[in-house]
Amino acid sequence: MDFLIFSDSHGKRRAMETAIGLQIKKPDAIFFLGDGLNDIADRVDGIPVICVRGNCDWSIGTRSVREEETVSFEGHRIFLTHGHRYAAKSGLGAMIRAAEERGADVVLYGHTHRPALDTIQTGSEGRTVTFFNPGSIAEGSFGTLTLTSDTVLFSHGTI
């Protein structure tokens, strides 16, 4: 499965439209990690959107959007958060604990506006968790994720 990942659009809807237009293949879904929920609908060009609320999403109309979600695709548990509740600007410590609690092997977060990719061994069993921040689409950065049952492949893109 192929996914597009956006965060922190802050009113720059066109930036997301541009990134979607750059894709060779239509993604199976879009993950939106907050701070610009008014910039994106529940579906974009027929593509389902899975979103979480960020610290700047005070007013999003009648949509009910949670601050975090855990979803499963291709046998992977993916934890989505904006990151502000887990002090993402100070490091991954709190998100590592949250990933362990949820049994997630992938964590998607935003908030820092900086693209990042980290793979960390957690817990006594040494389970691998991959942490990915697409950066800020308002600043031209986004991410892609390709999942199969035995592959987690991330990349950063720019517009």
Image: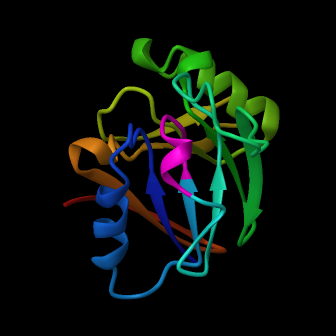
- Toward the bottom, the furthest residue is 25
Q: Is residue 109 above or below residue 83?
A: below
Q: Is residue 46 magenta?
A: no
Residue 130 visible from this viewpoint: no
Q: Is residue 110 above or below residue 2?
A: above
Quick one: quadrant of the N terminus? bottom right
Residue at position x 54%, y 19% from top?
Answer: 84
Q: At which x and y percent is residue 56?
A: 51, 24
Quarter of image, res 94: top right
Q: Seen in the image, is 108 located left or right of residue 116?
A: right
Quick one: quadrant of the C terminus? bottom left
Q: At which x and y percent is residue 7?
A: 44, 44
Q: Is residue 133 above or below residue 112?
A: below
Q: Seen in the image, is 1 located left or right of residue 5?
A: right
Quarter of image, res 124: top right
Residue 95 visible from this viewpoint: yes
Quarter of image, res 61: top right
Pick whichever, 42 or 3, lies toward us.
42
What residue range appears in magenta? 32-40
Residue at position x 22%, y 42% from top?
Answer: 139
Q: Seen in the image, is 131 located left or right of residue 29?
A: left
